[in-house]
Image (cartoon, rainbow, N blue to C red):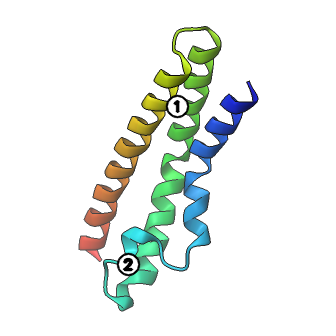
Amino acid sequence: MKHLLLACAALIGLSAMADAAAIDPPCDAYPPAKQARCIVIWKELNKEDGAAISQFGLDQLKRREEGKINAQQHLSENMAFIKQSTEKRLARLKERMAKE
């Protein structure tokens, strides 16, 4: 159970890790003059998706506790979700930066 809670906390905390970097990885592709704005937008996108990420983690935990998925499925689904949600945020970042 502790491992599950830690895994969910790690999933939820992914956006917090972005705050630790001086320039978030998706923003280092932009010219220095646009990087500050990119970081602001990226953090906004992470906040916007925070509730959905948390809900996914809670749903996963419930399914795991009910025995509907095993540890390997849980990890696999978490990785797929992280990849998909990050790709969506990156696409939205690109759209918003194009408008800038």
Up the image or down, 33 lies above or below 1; here it is below
Q: Secondary structure at mark 1?
A: helix
Marks 1 and 2 close (CB-CB < 8 Å)? no
Residue drawn at point x = 49 percent, y = 62 percent:
44
Q: Can you give x and y, in whole percent of width and height, for residue 8 in the image?
A: 62, 36
Q: Give the residue displayed 49% in from the left and 72% down from the top.
A: 40
* Residue at the disc numbered 2: 28
Mark 1 vs mark 2, foreground winner is: 2
Q: Residue at x 55, y 24 (%)?
A: 60
Viewer-closest of 32 and 6: 6
Label 1 to label 2: alpha-carbon separation? 29 Å
Q: Is residue 70 left or right of residue 89?
A: right
* Of pointers 1 and 2, the one earlier in the residue sequence: 2
x and y percent of residue 6 in the render?
Answer: 69, 38
Whole-percent x and y of residue 4?
66, 29
Q: Residue furthest front?
A: 72
Q: Which disc number belongs to residue 24?
A: none
Q: Which residue bears the numbered disc 1?
A: 56
